[in-house]
Each structure stands twice: as C-alpha cells, then as structure tokens.
Amino acid sequence: MSPHTFALAVVLASVALALWAAVRFPGAGPTTVSAAVLVILSGAAAVRAIPGLTNTTMQVAPAAAPLVVPFAIALPLLTYTFLSGLWVLRMIQRSLPGFPR
C-alpha cells in the first residue's frame, strides 16, 4: 500500500467514525451558535495540531512513530474535526423552520 493510499484510508476511516458517532449519539453536539463557533474553531485547531504533533513524535519516539502518528494522532483529530462539522450542520438544520427535527 502506498503512503497516499494509506493516508486516504485514514481520512475515510475518520469520516466513517464521525458519521457513526453522529448517528449513534444524535443529542450530542452544540445547541447554541456560540458553542458551534467554539466547536468549529477547536476542530480547526485539531487539524492544525497534526503536523506539530507528528514532528514531535518523530523526534521523541522515531521507532513508534509509524504506528503512533496515524492511529493515535491523525485518526482521532481528524475524526473530531469531521464530527464537529456534522454537529454544526445538524444544529443549522434543526434551527431552520419547516425541516424535520
């Protein structure tokens, strides 16, 4: 498997986990606009943290980095980012009149 294919698999797995969490826990997520903004900003911060955490892991534990980076850093942070987007979309959909809740 090429590195690009593996990266795509990690991203698709994080999307699948985010969809599962959003469907499994329909009451979770922000209920106010200010909470939604905070969730989106924290999701963006999570994505921005991936390169720094990857570099730190490569320096501190180079032998463990091939497993730690994709499964302990990238997968959870990407999952949270996608989940925060789904939560905000759900909150927007619930706030629109005429749409099912």
Image (spheres, rainbow, N blue to C red):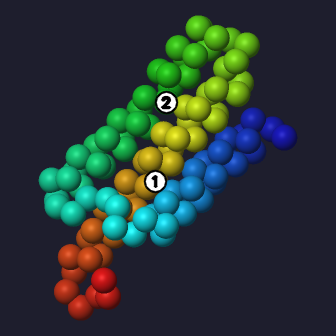
Question: Sequence-wise, which precedes: disc 1 or disc 2?
Answer: 2
Q: Quadrant of the C terminus?
A: bottom left
Q: Residue furthest bottom?
A: 98
Under mark 2, the amino acid is: Ile
Mark 1 residue crowding within 10 angstroms, few (<14) / some (14–19) / many (20+): many
Q: Residue at 84% across / 40% down in the picture? A: 1
Q: Which residue is mark 1?
A: 82
Residue 47 in which image quadrant? top left
Q: Residue at 50% across / 22% down in the picture? A: 53
> On the picture, is 43 further left or further right than 2?
left
Residue 93 in the image, given as x and y percentages of width and height = 29, 76
Residue 27 in which image quadrant? bottom left
> On the picture, is 62 further left or further right than 91?
right
Which label was assigned to residue 50? Answer: 2
Q: Residue at 63% across / 54% down in the picture? A: 12
Under mark 1, the amino acid is: Phe
Q: Nearer the viewer, residue 71 or 40?
A: 71
Residue 69 in the image, given as x and y percentages of width and height = 62, 28
Determine whether 19 is above or below 8 in the image.
below
Badge count? 2
Q: Give me the C-alpha separation between circle 1 and circle 2.
A: 14 Å
Residue 35 in the image, given as x and y percentages of width and height = 20, 53
Residue 45 in the image, given as x and y percentages of width and height = 35, 35
Mark 2 residue crowding within 10 angstroms, few (<14) / some (14–19) / many (20+): some
Q: Nearer the viewer, residue 42 or 20?
A: 20
Q: Nearer the viewer, residue 28 or 91?
A: 28
